[in-house]
Image (spheres, rainbow, N blue to C red):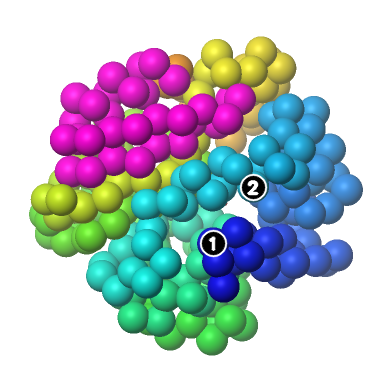
Amino acid sequence: MTRKEQIRSAYRLTGDNASFYDGMMTYSTFLGKAVCRIVWNMDGEKNLRYIERALSGIPEDFSGKLLEVPVGTGVLTMPVYKELPEADITCLDYSADMMGAAKRRAEALGIRNISFMQGDVGALPFEDDSFDIVLSMNGFHAFPDKEAAYRETFRVLKSGGTFCGCFYIKGGCARTDWFVNKLYVPKGFFTPPFETEESLRRRLAGLYSEAEVTAVDGMGCFLCRK
Ligand SMILES: C[S@@+](CC[C@H](N)C(=O)[O-])C[C@H]1O[C@@H](n2cnc3c(N)ncnc32)[C@H](O)[C@@H]1O
């Protein structure tokens, strides 16, 4: 299955019974599509583009050690992991509820080469240089201590390893910024301070030996090598 097909299969997985969250992440339900369009200015094609970009650091035949933090409900990544039977995958999240959904999804797909841990990205329970890839999708705009999160994701990555993913950046779409400030921050879904495309590029270039940042409206996608 190509990466695009894997992402599309995530969309199918949510189906008609999808939760609101999964429907939004996968542009697959009426309400989810409405949020993508109204809040994020994203249609199906843009949504697919940012997810593909965020996952682009994972080779299709990857067989090393991968950490995903935060895994959330795993709606975007479990279909990808299903196609990586030789990889050693660890998923971590603060919320047992979100991760419960990811575990059920992994079981339903018959993924065995995966383990789940509840924990804090700011104090990762792993040795230095443990992983070949650290993937972080839609996490940094939620993490309360972003400095610790940048430090810890860097620390546990092997030299030459890949750090990739995506999160909200301010200044990419005025409408998204408005909803984030008026709704997502007060409700506690997102926690400032937020990066801009430029500040993210500078930060990652300062940490990693190679760093690429691509913005899709208010979503910043990154691909770095340690
Ligand atoms: C918007 S969800 C993203 C989940 C998934 N990566 C996705 O793209 O669908 C944000 C997740 O960050 C988790 N989270 C927030 N703070 C965290 C922390 N300090 N350590 C680990 N996970 C955290 C939340 O529990 C939630 O599951």
Q: Nearer the viewer, residue 106 or 223?
A: 223
> Is residue 63 in view?
yes
Q: Nearer the viewer, residue 204 or 17?
A: 204
> In the rendering, which numbered label is found on residue 77?
none
Circle 2 sits in a helix, a strand or a loop, which is it?
helix
Q: Left or right of 15: which side holds 3?
A: left
70 over 200 or under it: above or below: below
Q: Earlier in the sequence, mark 2 or mark 1?
A: 1
Disc 1: which residue: 3
Is residue 200 magenta-colored?
yes
Is residue 102 magenta-colored?
no
140 over 110 or under it: above or below: above
Crowd tier of the residue under label 2, counting other residues whose Cα lies within 10 Å: few below 14, some 14–19, many 20 or above: some
Type of residue at label 2?
Answer: Leu
Residue drawn at x 69%, y 29% is: 40
Circle 1 sits in a helix, a strand or a loop, which is it?
helix
**x, y percentage for residue 69?**
39, 53
**x, y percentage for residue 180?**
63, 23
Q: Left or right of 132: which side holds 69?
A: right
Write the start and end of the magenta stretch as one range: 197-226
**x, y percentage for residue 221?**
46, 36
Residue 151 is drawn in which quadrant? top left
Residue drawn at x 46%, y 30% is: 214
Residue drawn at x 85%, y 45% is: 31
Crowd tier of the residue under label 1, counting other residues whose Cα lies within 10 Å: few below 14, some 14–19, many 20 or above: some
Residue drawn at x 60%, y 43% is: 49
Disc 2: which residue: 48
Type of residue at label 1?
Answer: Arg
Q: Left or right of 153: which side holds 120?
A: right
